[in-house]
Image (cartoon, helix red, strand yellow):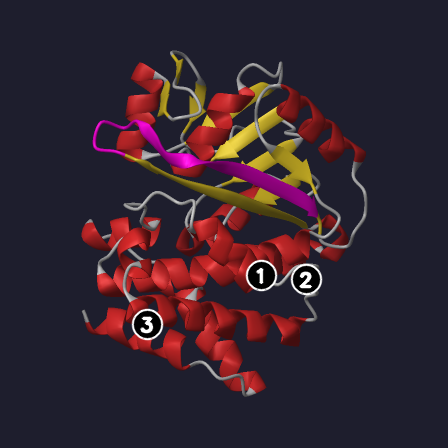
Amino acid sequence: MKILIYGVGGVGGFIGSHLQNTGFDISYIARGTRFEFLKKNGLKLKSQLGDKIIKKIKIYNTIPNKIDFDIIISTVKLYDFDAFIGEIKEKGLHETILLPFQNGVYSEQKISQEFGEEKTFGAVAQISSYINQNQYVIHKGKLASFFVGNMSDIVNKKLLKFCEISKNSGLDIQYKSNIKEKIWEKFIFLSAYSGITTLTKKSIGEIFASTTLKDNFVSAMIETYNLSKFFNVKFKVNPIDYWLEKIKKMPFDMTSSMYLDYLNNKQLELKWLSGFIVECSKKFDNKCETHQSILNGIVIK
């Protein structure tokens, strides 16, 4: 099975390092400094679950021609996703299984618009990881779970096999029939987490040590949860309660990738997170004061 990992940051690097022993033919796409480092030094991961060094990887700076990939894992930032889809179309790879491990809900909507609902797969990464100044993938904490599935609830045997082999090789990846629920479940947390950590310049532990900041965080989650109801998302378990329990086990100093991007003066995904929630809430008359304050506060800075 030929697998392409498009974007070798915290998520793509973690997944790739755990797929190297599967027997799959793994290729990577990276650009700039990241491409040069990976080409010369390989992929390096530091994690409480086990460090990994893959000295030689198959790395490209654009999708190679005449290779029919079975699965393409996309981990690019949301602001680069349209360009990724453009390259997929240019290379004629629209029959390939695309697994979009982006934040929010935009990437699945974009794939559905371009290729149709039946060819749309959802993907969720529950992990805190990033690239440090030495180009290592740094995994914070022990949470590293991944979920994939077809948005039309169609069982895909190839993807099922991919998950089975990957899981046997140590990657916690699950095929879910209710992937839409998992996407929104993460979005409820991620939109609050990215927004509040960036707005306050504080870690998850610092936020939950403050009654006021904790209340704002929970309020942001509730706003996104209420919005999900207008998209006909059904949850088996209350997602607010689910995340409040999860947060108790998160490292005190854990922070969002958006806040790290903010510190490094990089482009932010704010438009696709709190911005999306505010825009949709206006259409559905959904109360959205906390995300509006996040949007206003970060833009002002």
Q: Are marks 2 and 1 in contact (CB under 8 Å)?
A: yes
Q: SS at mark 1?
A: helix
Residue 127 vs 232, above or below: the answer is: above
In three-dimensional space, the C-alpha distance between marks 2 and 1, rounded to whole angstroms, equals 7 Å
Q: Which residue is mark 3?
A: 294
Residue type for callout 3: Ile
Between 58 and 216, the one nearer to me in the picture:
216
Q: State yes or no: residue 81 in magenta.
A: no
**Residue 7 drawn at (x, y percent):** 43, 37
Between 38 and 17, the one nearer to me in the picture:
17
Q: Which secondary structure is most common in the magenta stretch?
A: strand
Q: SS at mark 2?
A: loop
Residue type for callout 2: Phe
Q: Nearer the viewer, mark 3 or mark 2?
A: 2
Q: State yes or no: residue 139 in magenta.
A: yes
Disc 1 or 3, which lies upstream in sequence? Answer: 1
Res. 58 in view: yes
In three-dimensional space, the C-alpha distance between marks 1 and 3, rounded to whole angstroms, equals 21 Å
Residue at position x 26%, y 65% in the image? 199
Residue type for callout 1: Pro
Q: Are marks 1 and 3 in contact (CB under 8 Å)?
A: no
- Tell me where the magenta segment starts and ends, as one range: 132-149
**In this rendering, would 156 be left or right of 168?**
right
**In this rendering, would 66 be left or right of 216?**
right
Residue at position x 24%, y 57% in the image? 202
Determine which quarter of the picture holds residue 25. Answer: top right
Q: Which residue is mark 1?
A: 239
**Residue 247 drawn at (x, y percent):** 43, 52
In the rendered view of the protein, which quadrant contains the C terminus? bottom left
